[in-house]
Image (cartoon, rainbow, N blue to C red):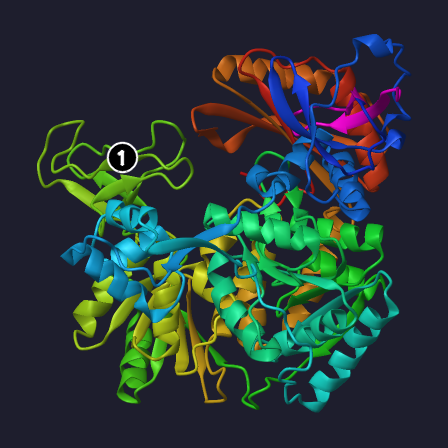
Amino acid sequence: MRQPVPVEVLLPYALERPYTYLSERALAAGTIVVVPLGTRQVLGAVWEQAQQAERPAQKMPTSRLKPVEEVLPAPPLPAPLRRLVDFVADYTLSPPGMVLRMVLRVPAALAPEKPLRALRLTGTEPERMTAARGRVMEAAGDGLAWTKAGLAEQAGVSPGVVDGLLKAGVLEEVIVPRQPAAGVPKPDFKPPHLSAQQKQAAGEVRDLVKARRFAVSLIEGVTGAGKTEVFFEAVAEALAAGRQVLILMPEIALTAAALERFASRFGAAPAEWHSEMAPKQRERVWRGVADGSVRAVIGARSALFLPFCELGLIVVDEEHDGAYKQEEGVIYHARDMAVAYGHLAGFPVILSSATPSVESRVNAARGRYRDIRLAERFSGGGPPAIELIDLRAAPPERGKSLAPPLAEALESNLGQGRQSLLFLNRRGYAPLTLCRHCGHRFTCPNCSAWLVEHRFRGVLACHHCGYEERRPDACPQCGAEESLVACGPGVERLQEEVETLFPEARSLVLSSDLAGGVKRLRLELAAVARGEADIVIGTQLVAKGHNFPNLTLVGVIDADLGLAQADPRAAERTFQLLTQVSGRAGRAGQASRAVLQTWQPMHPVIVALAAGDPEAFYHAEIDSRRRGGLPPFARLAAIIVSGAERAETEAYARALARAAPRQAGIDLLGPAEAPLALIRGRYRFRLLARAHAAKRLHAFLRAWLAEGPKPRGSLRVAVDIDPLSFL
C-alpha cells in the first residue's frame, strides 16, 4: 500500500504560511487542490517546501494531518507566477494567501469547460404538427446547430415546444466545439509603416525580446509619436518566438481602442481582462491563459496575476498612471510588480508613456532602464500650441466657468468645423451643495467628504463609499425651500454652460460614472472619434490614450486644481495630466492649440507647460525630490490605522507609534488624522516611515509590527509600501 505524502498547501486566506496535508501521491508544486479547513472544503495550491525555511519545524504526527480531498484537473500554477506571489507578499508585507487569492479569483475556471450542447434537425417529421412546431422547424431549417434557448427565441415559442420536438426525434442533440477565448495573432499579419525614429526604437525592443532575458525599456515620446506601434513590434517578436504577451492598461475604457488596434496589426483580437467582463468569459480567458491557447491579453492591473504558462513580455502602457496602484486588500503597484515579474522570470518589460513617472525617469538616467525617446509626432504635425489665460486679468462672468478668451476660441473652432475638448477633473454637476439660508452643507454620513450633486440622475453622491441620496427640494436642516445652491463647477454644469453659449453645437459629457457603465462609455468614445460631437466635456478619463482625429482645441478649465493638494506628487500629477490632455489635440497633423485657464501663471508646472519644456519640469522636480529626501531618493511606507471609534483608533495609533524601534536612518512621522479622516464609517490615522534603502525599511516594519501592540476588535492596520495617495 502506498504511503501518503505530506504536501504544503497555500490557501487563499489571510494566512502567513502554507498548511501541511497528506496526499495519496506526490504532487507537483502549483497543483491546485481541494482541502479541508475546519468544517469547509477550500481551494489551495501546493507550495514549495522552501517557503518553510524560516519557520520552526513542525512535529505534528502524520496521523493528525488531514488528507487532500481532490486534485483539480487545471494546469499547475507556473513557477514564475508562484515566485511572483511570494515576492508580492514579501514586498507589500501581505499574507501570501491573500496574494494567491488574486490568482485563484475565478474558481469556476479550475474545472474543465462544459461541452456546448446544441440542437439540429434529424429529417424526421413530427406525428403531430402545430403552428409553433412549424416555426421551430423553419428556424432550424438552415442546417445549423442551435442552442435550445436561441432556437426558441428565434421561433417565438416556449422552450417546451423545442423539448417536445427533441423527445419526438425531430431534433437531435449534438456537441458543438466552443469558440476559443481569443483568436491566434499573426506576428506578420500587417506590418506597420514606421518612421525612421520608430524603426530604430522598434529594433531596440525587438533585440531585447530576442535575447530572452530581463531588461526594462522606457519608451518615452510626445503624444501621438507612435509608441504603441513601437511596442507592438516587440509583441510581434515575442509571439513569433512562441511566447505569450501581456499588455497592461490603466483604464478599462482604453481597452476597446487597444483591442481594435491590436486586431488590425495582428489579424486577431487578444483576450481582454478587467472587472467588467462577464463571468463565463473570465473563466474562458483564465483557462486559455493557463493552457496556452490564449497568446495575448490586454487588461487592467489584475491581469498580472493570470496563470500565463509561457509569458515572454509585459508592456505597461501609460506607466505613470496612478490607476496601476491597488489601494485596498493587497496594496501593490502593478507597474513595479510587472518589473519584478520580469526579473523573477527572465523576460523583458516595456514601460511606455508620454509623461513618465519621476521614478522611471530617474531609473533611466541611472542606467537601470533602457531609455528610448520618440521626439516627433508620427503624423508630422507639431504639438499643440499652449496658451495661458490669466484668470486674474480675464475672469469668467459671475457663476460661469469659461473665460471670454476660451469662449471665443471655442466659437472660432466650431466655425471651422473642428472638435473641441473642455477638460475639468470634477465629476457630476457640483462638488458641494449648501443652503444659502442656514449654511447647511450636504456631507456623506460615512465619510468626511461633501456629497457631489449629479443633476442628470437627481442624486447627491459620495465618490468615496458610493452613498447616494435624492436631492431634496427643501433644506433638511431649516426647511427652507428653493434655497439649495450648487457651489463650484462639475462636468455636468459645464455642459449646461456650453449649451447656453452654443445651442447649435453637439455637446457630450465623458466621465467614468456615466449611466450604462463601460459599454456606453466605449460607444460614446467611438462616436467622438467619428466626429459625432462638436464639444466634448470630460474628466481625466479623456486624457489617456484616445485618438480623436478632428480634435484641434483643448480647453483646461482649472489648470491649478491638482496643485492645491498636500501631496508630494501634486506637481508631477498635474504636469502629467495637463500634458496628456493637451496632447489629445492635433493628432492627425492639423494645427492645434491648448488653452489653460489658471490663477497661477508663474507656477513652475504652468511655466514648463507653456514653454513646451518637459525637461525643465523633470529637472526641477527631480532636484526638489533629491533635496527633500523623497522618492525615488528615499523609500516611504504609510501605516494606516482605522477603526469604528475615533478615540480608540487614535489611542491605538499612538500606542503603535510608541512601540516603534528606534533605528538610525529611519524617520517615523505621526500619527496624524488622515485628510480624509472618515471613510466608509471607519476613522483613520496615518503614520509615515521613511528610509533610504528598501531593505532597511522592510526590516524595520517587520520588527515593529511583530513587536507592537496587536489590533483588537474593529481596529485594522494597513501597510502601503511606496504610497501614491496621502489622503
Q: Against 38, is 324 above or below?
A: below
Image quarter of the N terminus: top right
Tell me if 105 is positioned left or right of 335 in this view: left
Extreme-left residue of the structure: 481
On screen, residue 295 above or below 23: below
- Residue 153: give x, y in percent of width and height: 26, 55
For the point 54% across and 69% down, which residue is it? 258
Amino acid, disc 1: Arg
On the picture, is 406 further left or further right than 225? left
Nearest the viewer among 463 and 112 is 112
Q: Is residue 345 left or right of residue 596?
A: right
Provide the residue span drawn in magenta.
Answer: 1-22
On the image, numbered disc 1 is attached to which residue? 441
Residue 557: x and y in percent read 37, 64
Residue located 68% across and 72% down the image: 220
Q: Residue at x 58, y 67 (%)?
A: 183
Q: Is 293 drawn above or below residue 230 in the view shown?
A: above
